[in-house]
Structures are given as structure tokens and as C-alpha cells.
């Protein structure tokens, strides 16, 4: 009987001494398990009149821009669709940490600067996924997307007819500036096309 109690005591001592590490690791694995089990998918629809966030995919089927919002390692990521939504990519998407450390836009109307250096770094990085191409242009849909995001973020009401000039900086301090920027993320490496 004494040996059983002695053995039980020897088992309890390391657990007591390392309880914080044990609890931390259990919570870490539990969180990791939940992240891969459920991506917490929500949907955003954008058209000329408004932007909606919903949990039901049917609510955004008539919108010009459809965005799927999901989590990878507790970071919000977004996938942009103009037509039908493809869920196969999202289910198998690995985590990608973007190399863009600064992204700003300037808004122009008829070559006249309206506002300079609006920070969209977080929003842009949410769209940069593993093995994807992101085109930043002045097409009607791109203006609709980015100006709506800016209006929503800062509670402004900028016209969707403004010209956007994008400025990006990578973590190696290289910069690119222009009205049309194509970004390619291939095998975790970000390049400009």
C-alpha cells in the first residue's frame, strides 16, 4: 500500500511542478485542433449600393463581388470571387504569412490627388493566400472592392469612380508603385508580375 502511495506521489510532483507548461500545451493543441476542424467561414457581398456580412452563402448570390472570410491559425483570410464560389481551395489551404509589410493607396479624380497614403496593409494581406494571384487594377470591380473596404474601414463615402494608385513594400524593403500591380504568391514566395 505504501509503495502505491509513494508511486502516486512521484507521479503528482512533476505534474504539479510543470502544470503551467502542461496546461499551455494542452490549450495550444486544442486550439490547433479546432482551427483545422472548422475554418469559421462567413461571407461578404459587395455591390454599388452596399456591403453585407452574413453566415449564409445564399444572401450574397446577387452581389457583384463575393468574398469568403475564413481563419487559418487565428488569422483572418479572404478569397475574392466574381462568379461561383469554389470551396475546394479553402479546405486544403496552408498558412501563408505575407511578405507585404506596407500597402497604401492614393485616390485621384482627374489626376488631382484627393487623399494620400490610406493604409490597407491588413486588408491586402487578408487576400494574399498560398499559391494565388492577386491583381490590383483600376477595373470597375477592383475599384468597387477597395473603395468599399476603405469607406467601411474609415467610415467615409468616397466615390467608386476615383482612380487608385497602389504602393506596396515587401519585407526586404523593395517597393512598387502603380495603378496596376499583379502579385503572384507561388510556393510561399511573393513576386510582382
Image (cartoon, rainbow, N blue to C red):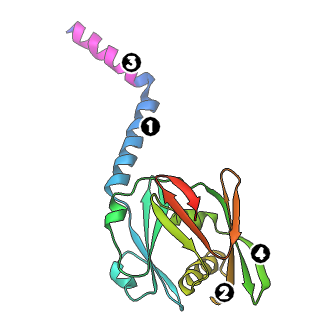
Residue located at (42% from left, 29% from top): 19
Magenta span: 2-15
Q: Earlier in the sequence, mark 2 or mark 4?
A: 4
Mark 3, residues whose alpha carbon is within 10 Å: few (<14), some, or many (≥20)?
Answer: few
Q: Earlier in the sequence, mark 2 or mark 1?
A: 1
Query: What secondary structure is the magenta-colored segment mainly?
Result: helix
Residue located at (38% from left, 57% from top): 93
Q: Identify the residue under disc 4.
A: 116
Classify mark 3: helix, strand or loop.
helix
Q: Which mark is residue 162?
A: none
Q: Earlier in the sequence, mark 1 or mark 4?
A: 1
Q: Position of residue 50 (x, y in %)?
A: 52, 88
Q: Position of residue 104 (x, y in %)?
A: 69, 68
Q: Identify the residue under disc 2.
A: 157
Q: 124 and 191: which one is in front?
A: 191
Residue 13 included in the magenta stretch of the image: yes
Classify mark 1: helix, strand or loop.
helix
Q: Quadrant of the N terminus?
A: top left
Residue located at (40% from left, 71% from top): 42
Q: CA distance from mark 3 to mark 1?
A: 18 Å
Which residue extends farthest right? 112
Q: Identify the residue under disc 3.
A: 13
Classify mark 4: helix, strand or loop.
strand
Q: Earlier in the sequence, mark 3 or mark 1?
A: 3
Amino acid at each position: 500500500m505504501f509503495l502505491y502511495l509513494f508511486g502516486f506521489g512521484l507521479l503528482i510532483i512533476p505534474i504539479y511542478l510543470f502544470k503551467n507548461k502542461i496546461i499551455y500545451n494542452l490549450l495550444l493543441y486544442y486550439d490547433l485542433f479546432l482551427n483545422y476542424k472548422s475554418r469559421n467561414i462567413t461571407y461578404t457581398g459587395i455591390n454599388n449600393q452596399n456591403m453585407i456580412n452574413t453566415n449564409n452563402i445564399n444572401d450574397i448570390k446577387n452581389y457583384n463581388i463575393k468574398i469568403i472570410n475564413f481563419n487559418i491559425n487565428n488569422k483572418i483570410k479572404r478569397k475574392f470571387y466574381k462568379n461561383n464560389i469554389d470551396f475546394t481551395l479553402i479546405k486544403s489551404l496552408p498558412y501563408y504569412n505575407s511578405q507585404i509589410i506596407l500597402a497604401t493607396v492614393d485616390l485621384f479624380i482627374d489626376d488631382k490627388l484627393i487623399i494620400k497614403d490610406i493604409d490597407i496593409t491588413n486588408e491586402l494581406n487578408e487576400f494574399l493566400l498560398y499559391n494565388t494571384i492577386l491583381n490590383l487594377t483600376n477595373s470597375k470591380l477592383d475599384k468597387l472592392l477597395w473603395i468599399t473596404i476603405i469607406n467601411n474601414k474609415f467610415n467615409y463615402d468616397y466615390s467608386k469612380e476615383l482612380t487608385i494608385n497602389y504602393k506596396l513594400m515587401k519585407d526586404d524593403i523593395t517597393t512598387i508603385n502603380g495603378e496596376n500591380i499583379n502579385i503572384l504568391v507561388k510556393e510561399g514566395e511573393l513576386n510582382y508580375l
